[in-house]
Amino acid sequence: MIVIKTPEQIERMRRSCQLLVEAFREAEKLIVPGVRTREIDAAVEAFVRARGGLPAFKGYRGYPASVCISVNEVVIHGIPGDQELREGDIVSLDMGVVLDGYYSDGARTYAVGQVSEEKQRLMDAAREALEEAIAAAREGNRVGDISWAIQRTVEARGFSVVRQFCGHGIGRNLHEEPEVPNYGSPRKGPRLRCGMTLALETMVNAGTHEVEILADGWTVVTRDRKPSAHFEHTVAITDRGADVLTLGL
């Protein structure tokens, strides 16, 4: 069942989302060569808890950290640890917050110093695909219109979209209906209505769309080990188009 939120509930989500944006700003200070990914995770968790929020991912289905930190060929769900960021890496931070009973979710890929032209084009394509997805997220459209906007944008730039994982509804739960795939056909799927809240996320691979899950049960990597990029916003559907609750991310 797709949950329709009241304006008051959306405002509560916005507060959760804005704390999440502030947490991203905090994390960005640490994205430099030599930092260990667990240092970023610890800083974000302390920042969120000090402001009355909870890290949404920690303990969710057994996930052991507050932030998913995915480097280069890791698509999503990279577990923070002793890995050091290096000059030329790209690193995706995916994190969520629970505040006043409402979830927020967002992701962004960063360059660590100077990166290759291919990695830069990959990140640009994933970010532009998310912008197109947000433009398609308006009342009366269908979920397939969002999915097609993502796929069309990415494939026109010579990259591929991840098919095994997707965006989703969000609200009082981290994952709600509907699923929002990164591929599909226009005018298909559930119709978008005012009050729906969605986490739109573009997961874009430089090579094949196929992925593998490593032995830890979490880390998702590209099958061909080429790099991947990930951008995500939490939005609300309104009669004026998509309201980006994670504005500023």
Image (cartoon, rainbow, N blue to C red):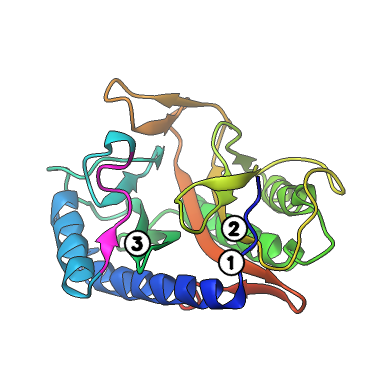
Residue 249 visible, this orientation: no
Asked if the magenta segment contains residue 96, the reply would be no
Q: Secondary structure at mark 3?
A: strand
Image point (38%, 63%), residue name: 101
The tag on residue 98 is 3
Left or right of 46: which side holds 149?
Answer: right
The tag on residue 198 is 2
Image point (25%, 42%), residue name: 59
Instruction: Kindly identify which residue carries mark 1.
Output: 235
Q: Residues within 10 Å of mark 1 (few under 14, many from 20)?
A: many
Residue 169 coordinates in the image, percent (x, y): 58, 52
Image point (19%, 58%), residue name: 40
- Alpha carbon distance from label 1 to label 3: 16 Å
Q: Residues within 10 Å of mark 2 (few under 14, many from 20)?
A: many
Q: Residues within 10 Å of mark 3 (few under 14, many from 20)?
A: many
Do the residues bearing badges 1 and 2 touch, measured as CB atoms within 8 Å?
A: yes
* Residue type pointed to by label 2: Leu
Residue at the top extreme? 215
